[in-house]
Image (cartoon, helix red, strand yellow):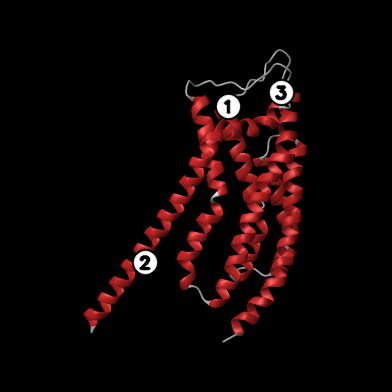
Amino acid sequence: MHRDAESDLDSSLLDHLIELRARLLRGLAGLMAVFLCLLPFARRLYAWLAQPLVDKLPEGSNLIAVEVASPFFAPVKLAFFVALFAAMPWLLYQLWAFVAPGLYRREKRLAMPLLVSALTLFYAGCAFAYFLVLPVVFGFLTSVTPEGVAMMTDIHAYLDFVLVIFLAFGLSFELPVAMVILVLLGWVTPEQLRESRGYAIVGVFVLAAVVTPPDVISQLMLAIPMCLLYEAGIVAARMLAPRQDRIAEEP
């Protein structure tokens, strides 16, 4: 009987590993399919990404390529990251399909809305950074360029800078989801979050000062939305915390 139990355990582990491999392969296949579809449009994608800086550059100024292979690798790198962002729902679905069978009913009810909310907020943060923050940042940087100095940014350095900004704002907009998860785990309560509002605001402004360029406007453009998202997180935590209690009592 002991050997039978060990055999069942090994068989179950092997089945999980096979399922994990299948989900990973499906996720990578979907990502590569999107990447290959975007690859012919890589140069156009880069031109679209560079528009906020190009609009602020003095007349006659352009982006430059310092490295020999930068004109090829920078657009391809951008196409890959765009494909990663676009394929994220498919990748998260593969993750959900793998872990969902092992979740309780109450966990399934909460996990999917949290995943959808996290994805939506991340996209919202990236869109906010592109349409509102980047024009302000580049307007400030071009305005403080000393006379006699031509602002000629390398295309690879520009791509890295913009991706960091996207990541910073995308993750910052995840604040309400993180707060709800902490409340659902029982680590904090909505009342504690409300009482810690002052410390949170100070932390938000410190984070904004570190992440954004050294101008007040861009710092405020990150800090103010995060403060509003903190309040939204408190409201969402209040709504979900009692609901969690009711679900836990269901048979």
Residue drawn at the location 22% of the way across and 79% of the way down: 3
> What's the amino acid at mark 3?
Leu
| Dot 2 crowding, Cα within 10 Å, few <14, some 14–19, many 20+ | few
| Dot 3 crowding, Cα within 10 Å, few <14, some 14–19, many 20+ | many
Q: Secondary structure at mark 1?
A: helix
Q: Quadrant of residue 48?
A: top right
| Image coordinates for residue 25, horizontal then vertical, percent | 40, 54
Q: Nearer the viewer, residue 66 or 179?
A: 66
Residue drawn at the location 48% of the way across and 61% of the way down: 95
| Image coordinates for residue 131, horizontal then vertical, percent | 72, 40
Q: Quadrant of residue 178?
A: bottom right
Disc 3 versus disc 1: distance between alpha carbons? 14 Å
Most extreme residue toward the top, as rendered?
148
Residue drawn at the location 50% of the way across and 73% of the way down: 103
> What's the amino acid at mark 1?
Ile
- Mark 3 sits on what residue? 57
Q: Is residue 238 left or right of residue 111?
A: right
Q: Nearer the viewer, residue 187 or 249?
A: 249
> What's the amino acid at mark 2?
His
| Image coordinates for residue 38, horizontal then vertical, percent | 54, 39
Q: Is residue 175 left or right of residue 18?
A: right
Question: What label does residue 16 carry, if any?
Answer: 2
Specify which label sits upstream in the sequence, 3 or 1: 3
Residue 27 visible here = yes
Q: Nearer the viewer, residue 74 or 162?
A: 74
Question: What label does residue 155 carry, if any?
Answer: 1
